[in-house]
Amino acid sequence: MRVCPKCGYEDPFCWRDPYSRGMETQYARFDELKEAQPEIAEKLMQSPLYPKNPIREAWIGPYVYGLWKSGYVRRRLFSIWLYQKWKTIPMEKVKNENHNQTRLLEVEKEKTKVERD
């Protein structure tokens, strides 16, 4: 549960962090959202259903909400949604794949060198 340190606002309990998508998106079941925040559920049901991507979307306050056919609602900050839409944010790529393993070997060599001296 999120609490604003400035004003003390508590986020409704229905919003969860997904395991695989990171912290930039939260999700809730639509039936739980109807109980916790009925005004958001109502605006989502009034929004048009896009034929290309069957999602109902609504921009309310700092968040964009999306209702999927599965019955789940996702929310994302508008500033992130503006560039990424509902796609996941790509992770950074490391150029040297064995960087950590190489570094561990160097540390082990240094340890054995110090022990010998």
Image (tube, rainbow, N blue to C red):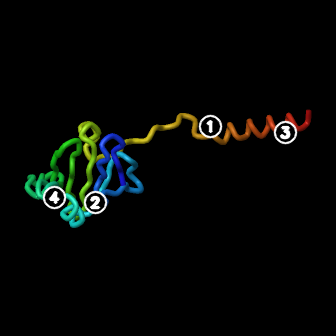
Label 4: which secondary element: helix
Q: Can you identify the residue that label 2 sits on?
A: 28
* In this view, the mark in front (3 or 1): 3
Q: Is residue 102 above or below residue 36?
A: above
**Mark 3 burial class by Cα count in 10 Å: few <14, some 14-19, many 20+:** few
- Are the residues flagged by discs 2 and 1 in contact, CB closer than 8 Å? no
Q: Is residue 77 above or below residue 49?
A: above
Label 3: which secondary element: helix
- Quarter placement of the N terminus: bottom left
Q: Can you identify the residue that label 1 sits on?
A: 99
Q: Earlier in the sequence, mark 4 or mark 1?
A: 4
Q: Amino acid at mark 4?
A: Ala
**Left or right side of 97 for 16:** left
Q: Is residue 15 above or below residue 105?
A: below
* In this view, the mark in front (2 or 1): 2
Can you see residue 47?
yes
Farthest residue, direction bottom: 31
**Mark 2 burial class by Cα count in 10 Å: few <14, some 14-19, many 20+:** some
| C-alpha span from label 3 to label 2 | 53 Å
- Are the residues flagged by discs 3 and 4 in contact, CB closer than 8 Å? no
| C-alpha span from label 4 to label 1 | 48 Å
Q: Which mark is residue 112?
A: 3
- Which residue is at 18% across, 52% downward? 53
Q: Amino acid at mark 3?
A: Thr
| C-alpha span from label 2 to label 1 | 39 Å
Q: Can you identify the residue that label 4 sits on?
A: 41
- Which residue is at 48% across, 38% downward? 93
